[in-house]
Image (spheres, rainbow, N blue to C red):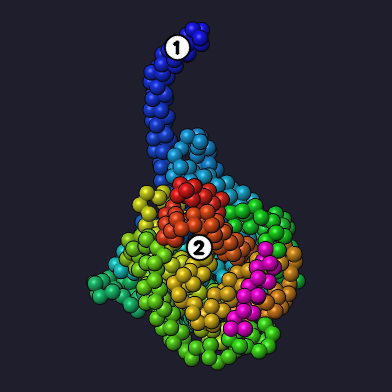
């Protein structure tokens, strides 16, 4: 008994004797760790700042779009080898810088930024090996169209002061050099067998031709001059008119004509007519694998994504059959698709009616979003028609964020081309996706987060961003906006369309599907008019992998919500869930999953 007591006492003395020095030692180590964390955080913040500043200098159009007007007069030669080498060197240099940081010692919030920054640099470096610059023109995104939009005076390029007009004049003078480089690159692409499908160029040429006018004053580049602000002095106004007339007539219009002539006479005969996907180009399968990874932030294979798409199409078809039964529709699903596509009750009488119908939905949405969110954007938004020169190839809707100073509102661009292909039952889902609470909430909130590094404020994780947009479409159920079975059908049709994208994007680029195979599958699987089917099919050809992001992202966000609802039960708070998803801005899906699961564990 005495031995046992002595042992206990000696053990107690040992523990007590070691306790205070150990506590002091732990406290010292904790302070050292805290100081090191603080030092690393400051290092990272400086790295992020320096990188973003250099990125804006390298890409002044990005600066203009986010409302940073320091480089509004600059237009680099984006397609030149020198520019591409400089871009790659920037990525490598900053990857080396961030690799010096010991990430395991960073706090959680800093770790997210570190992981995203490092991943983005690695993706950019990997992507540089693929010859994207040899395919500079397509019908969906091309520099000729983007410059025309900027020139219109209704986009990001400001036209408020004399200095603004001088800045754009300087940019216009650089257009020929950029177009000449695009032509040179396409020539190299022809030599290497890396060319666009002919059908894409056939759609791009009219967009370029639309900017070629006999009378300078009919050009979109003249519009800011026609709308000169009254604040600009008469002498300055006259000088602007003279300068713009000269540049548009002798620099801009000839450059557009030269590009159009080259595409017509030289490139079209060499463009592909028997293949349409990335996989058919030299090294194309690895290129497409990279595009999948970059767009979905997953390692899913093309085959796996293709099967996910097929499974989702089958599931949604079953839900559509339920609506057929609810509305007492007689016939099979193809007959129902034909009815939903062509019945006159779903066709707008005019473009203006369509725009006003979408605008009218805003009031109902504004009343209900407070039930689902406690985090809101400060920026305003407006609904605007897609410009006519690009409407034939534009998507049904798109979103352009407001600049950070909110000097102009964000824009939900609504495509009103060919009203017969824009049925009214698509309204609710499209509005929720592009406006509120879709892209407007996610992108504007992200840009307004004060503590977020700028590379994340203005960064885009496609699977997260588009996944949130598609997830937002289904929030119409929570808001009571789908009481009408036809609007509910519209939500299913929109989700079906994104599921079809998984099938046809992988079909085109990994399985060698033809344009007609894609169109046949679309007509067989969804209610879609020809104009939309064609523009969508050709969009997938032009942007390999981009269309995969929507459904892959939405499936992950929906899965995380279901998992949280199941585990938390009555403790689940939809507002808190949405805050967790939105409060850090766009993140890779793997980061989002860890973040939400950590939040669920904290609630438990």
Up the image or down, 416 lies above or below 97; here it is below
| Magenta highlight: main SS | helix
Snapshot quadrant of residue 244: bottom left
Snapshot quadrant of residue 457: bottom left
Q: Is residue 35 found inside the magenta-colored segment of the image?
A: no
Residue located 40% across and 50% down the image: 452
Q: Position of residue 234 (x, y in %)?
A: 24, 74
Q: Residues within 10 Å of mark 1 (few under 14, many from 20)?
A: few
Q: Is residue 326 visible?
A: yes
Q: Is residue 131 visible?
A: no
Q: Secondary structure at mark 2?
A: helix
Residue tagged 1:
9
The residue segment tinted magenta is 308-326
- Would residue 67 be found to the left or right of residue 279 on screen? left
Q: Is residue 318 found inside the magenta-colored segment of the image?
A: yes
Up the image or down, 509 lies above or below 153; here it is above
Return the residue nearer the eye: 310 or 503: 310
Task: Report the residue that reaches farthest toward the front.
Answer: 1
Q: Residues within 10 Å of mark 2 (few under 14, many from 20)?
A: many
Residue located 41% across and 49% down the image: 453
Residue located 44% across and 52% down the image: 584
Spatial separation of the CA atoms under disc 1 and disc 2:
62 Å
- Would residue 117 be found to the left or right of residue 408 on screen? right
- Residue 468 bears which disc, if any? 2
- Residue 131 bears which disc, if any? none
Q: Position of residue 101 (x, y in %)?
A: 49, 35
Mark before the other along the chain sequence, 1 or 2 = 1
Q: Secondary structure at mark 1?
A: helix
- Asked if labels 2 and 1 touch by Cβ distance under 8 angstroms, the answer is no
Return the residue nearer the eye: 82 or 536: 536
Nearer the observer, disc 1 or disc 2? Answer: 1
């Amino acid at each position: 008994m005495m031995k046992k007591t002595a042992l206990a006492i000696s053990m107690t003395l040992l523990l007590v004797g070691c306790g205070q020095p150990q506590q002091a030692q732990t406290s010292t180590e904790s302070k050292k760790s805290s100081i090191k964390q603080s030092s690393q955080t400051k290092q990272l913040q400086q790295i992020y700042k320096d990188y973003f500043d250099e990125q804006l200098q390298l890409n002044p159009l990005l600066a203009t779009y986010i409302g940073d007007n320091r480089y509004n007069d600059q237009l680099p030669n984006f397609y030149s080898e020198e520019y591409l080498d400089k871009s790659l060197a920037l990525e490598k240099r900053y990857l080396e810088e961030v690799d010096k940081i010991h990430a395991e010692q960073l706090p959680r919030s800093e770790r997210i930024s570190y992981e995203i920054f490092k991943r983005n640099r690695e993706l950019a470096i990997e992507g540089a090996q693929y010859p994207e610059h040899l395919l500079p023109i397509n019908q969906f995104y091309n520099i000729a169209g983007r410059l025309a939009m900027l020139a219109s005076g209704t986009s990001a390029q400001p036209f408020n002061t004399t200095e603004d007009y001088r800045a754009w004049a300087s940019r216009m003078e650089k257009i020929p050099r950029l177009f000449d480089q695009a032509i040179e690159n396409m020539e190299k692409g022809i030599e290497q067998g890396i060319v666009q499908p002919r059908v894409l160029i056939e759609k791009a040429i009219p967009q370029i031709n639309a900017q070629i006018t006999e009378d300078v004053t009919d050009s979109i580049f003249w519009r800011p001059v026609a709308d000169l602000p009254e604040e600009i002095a008469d002498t300055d106004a006259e000088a602007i008119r003279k300068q713009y007339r000269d540049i548009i007539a002798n620099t801009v219009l000839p450059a557009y004509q030269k590009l159009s002539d080259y595409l017509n006479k030289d490139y079209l005969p060499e463009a592909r007519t028997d293949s349409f996907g990335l996989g058919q180009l030299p090294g194309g399968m690895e290129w497409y694998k990279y595009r999948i990874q970059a767009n979905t932030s997953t390692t899913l294979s093309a085959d796996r994504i293709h099967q996910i798409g097929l499974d989702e199409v089958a599931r949604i078809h079953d839900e559509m059959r339920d609506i057929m039964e609810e509305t007492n529709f007689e016939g099979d699903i193809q007959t129902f698709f034909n009815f939903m596509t062509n019945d006159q009750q779903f066709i707008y009488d005019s473009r203006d009616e369509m725009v006003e119908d979408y605008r009218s939905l805003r009031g109902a949405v504004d009343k209900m979003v407070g039930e689902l969110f406690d985090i809101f954007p400060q920026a305003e938004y407006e609904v605007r028609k897609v410009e006519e020169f690009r409407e034939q190839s534009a998507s049904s809707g798109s979103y352009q964020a407001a600049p950070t100073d909110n000097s102009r509102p964000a824009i939900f661009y609504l495509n009103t081309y060919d009203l017969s292909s824009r049925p009214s039952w698509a309204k609710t889902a499209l509005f929720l996706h592009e406006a509120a609470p879709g892209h407007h909430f996610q992108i504007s909130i992200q840009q307004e987060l004060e503590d977020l590094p700028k590379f994340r404020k203005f960064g885009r994780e496609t699977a997260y961003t588009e996944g949130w947009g598609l997830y937002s479409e289904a929030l119409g159920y929570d808001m009571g906006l789908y009481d009408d079975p036809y609007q509910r059908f519209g939500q299913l049709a929109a989700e079906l369309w994104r599921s079809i994208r998984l099938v046809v994007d992988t079909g085109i680029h990994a399985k060698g599907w033809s344009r007609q195979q894609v169109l046949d599958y679309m007509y067989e699987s969804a209610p879609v008019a020809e104009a939309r089917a064609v523009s969508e099919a050709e969009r997938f050809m032009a942007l390999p992998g981009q269309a995969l992001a929507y459904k892959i992202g939405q499936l992950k966000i929906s899965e995380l919500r279901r998992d949280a609802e199941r585990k938390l039960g009555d403790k689940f708070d939809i507002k808190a869930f949405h805050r967790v998803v939105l409060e850090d801005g766009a993140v890779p899906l793997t980061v989002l999953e860890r973040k939400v699961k950590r939040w669920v564990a904290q609630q438990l």
